[in-house]
Structures are given as C-alpha cells and as structure tokens.
C-alpha cells in the first residue's frame, strides 16, 4: 500500500495554483445570509440554534464544494481546447473566457435536474399503504420548500459563482506554465 500512495506523491498536480481571486466563500456567505436564508425561513426564533448552525455549515460546505468543482471543469476545458483558451487568457478577455466556459444547453438541463431533485426530496410525505415504495404525486402534493426556488438559487447564485471561479482560475492559469515549464517539471520529477 505504501508504494501505491508513495508513487502518487510524484504525480503532477491536476490543477494549477488557485489564485485568491477565485476564492468566493465570503460572497457565498453574503448571498446565503442575505438572500437564501430569508427566502427559505419564516421570520422568528425557533430556539434551535445548535441544529440550525450545524445545518447552515453543512449547506454552505455543500454549495462551496459544488462551486469549487468548477476549478476542475475549467482545467478540463483548458486542456481540451488549450490553444483557444490560451489566446483568451493572454488577451485577458474575461467575456471571451465566460463564453468559452458557458454551455447554455447544459446549464438549462442542470437547472431542470435540480428542480426535479428538489421536487423529489422536499415532498411532504404522509403514511403510505402497505408495499408502497414511493409517494404518489398528485395535485395535492405539498413541499417543504418550493422546488422552483431551489432552481432559482442554482441559476442565480451557484452557477454564476462557479463561473466566476472558473474565469478567475483561467486568467491565472498560464502563470504556473511560465514559472515552471513542463520540460523543467519533468526533470525535477525524475522522468
């Protein structure tokens, strides 16, 4: 086992260094406190401070993880169209990079998927009949939260922050290449 993990230490990192400009946690926290929580929660104090704090941290970590997956997406897009991406990066073309990373059809499908998952997992479920494995949908189906709002959160907050992370990462993507060209890296890794 030691050799297996030891050999991983000699691998090149997947990502280039992540610039500070690509870190959006403070923006996410501001959006969460100022927009998302007020839209989801009723006014007042239910006294559940501990469990609320735990859930807030869990939700923020989940959203942050989803946003930072954008770093890997940006790297993949860079590697699949290196020449095009390099030209945009060297020109400092933020709008061009935004167009480069944006796939409107994929985004629309992802928003629909988020709404469908929200409909599935936020249903108020009453007792079922013997052998019933799933709730029956009807016009009377109610939800703990509005599924369409979760789609809106994804569209208006999560996706834009993810794309901001991707663009900021790409704008600095070539910095590592200039400082440490691939030929030099191979020599230092003993290849």
Image (cartoon, helix red, strand yellow):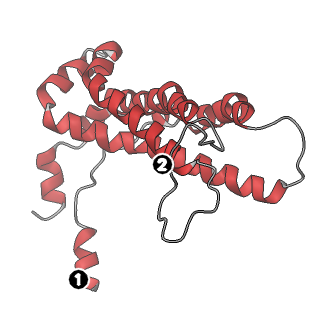
Lateral position of residue 95 relative to residue 117, left or right: left
Q: Is residue 170 above or below residue 76?
A: above
Q: Is residue 85 above or below residue 28?
A: above
Looking at the image, which residue is at 49% across and 65% down? 132
Q: Is residue 103 visible?
A: no
Q: Nearer the viewer, residue 140 or 12?
A: 140
Residue 149: x, y in percent? 58, 31
Residue 131: x, y in percent? 48, 71
In which quadrant of the rendered image does the N terminus lie? bottom left
User: Which picture quadrant has residue 24?
Assistant: top right
Label 1 belongs to which residue? Answer: 3
Label 2 belongs to which residue? Answer: 65
Count the marks. 2
Looking at the image, which residue is at 23% across and 66% down? 10
How would you rate the neighbour count of disc 2 (Cα within 10 Å): few for under 14, some for 14-19, many for 20 or more?
few
Q: Residue furthest front?
A: 129
How much space separates mark 2 and mark 1, taking CA atoms? 30 Å
Q: Residue furthest bottom?
A: 1
Q: Is residue 86 above or below residue 94?
A: below
In which quadrant of the rendered image does the C terminus lie? bottom left
User: Which picture quadrant has residue 104?
Assistant: top left
Badge nearest the viewer, 2 or 1: 2
Q: Is residue 114 visible?
A: yes
Q: Nearer the viewer, residue 159 or 116?
A: 116
Q: Nearer the viewer, residue 93 or 30?
A: 30
Residue 78: x, y in percent? 21, 34
User: Which picture quadrant has residue 83?
Assistant: top left
Lateral position of residue 74 relative to residue 145, left or right: left
Point out which mark residue 164 bears: none
Looking at the image, which residue is at 44% across and 41% down? 116
How would you rate the neighbour count of disc 1 (Cα within 10 Å): few for under 14, some for 14-19, many for 20 or more?
few
Looking at the image, which residue is at 14% across and 31% down? 81
């Amino acid at each position: 086992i030691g050799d297996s993990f030891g050999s991983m230490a000699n691998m090149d990192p997947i990502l280039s260094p992540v610039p500070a400009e690509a870190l959006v946690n403070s923006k996410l926290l501001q959006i969460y406190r100022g927009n998302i929580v007020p839209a989801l929660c009723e006014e007042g104090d239910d006294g559940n401070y501990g469990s609320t704090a735990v859930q807030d941290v869990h939700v923020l970590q989940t959203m942050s993880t989803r946003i930072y997956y954008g770093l890997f997406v940006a790297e993949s897009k860079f590697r699949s169209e290196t020449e095009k991406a390099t030209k945009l990066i060297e020109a400092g073309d933020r709008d061009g990079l935004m167009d480069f990373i944006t796939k409107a059809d994929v985004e629309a499908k992802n928003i629909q998927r988020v709404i469908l998952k929200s409909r599935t997992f936020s249903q108020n479920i009453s007792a079922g009949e013997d052998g019933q494995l799933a709730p029956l949908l009807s016009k009377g189906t109610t939800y703990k939260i509005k599924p369409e709002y979760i789609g809106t959160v994804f569209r208006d907050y999560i996706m834009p922050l993810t794309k901001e992370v991707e663009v900021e990462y790409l704008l600095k993507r070539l910095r590592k290449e200039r400082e440490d060209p691939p030929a030099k890296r191979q020599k230092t890794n003993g290849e």
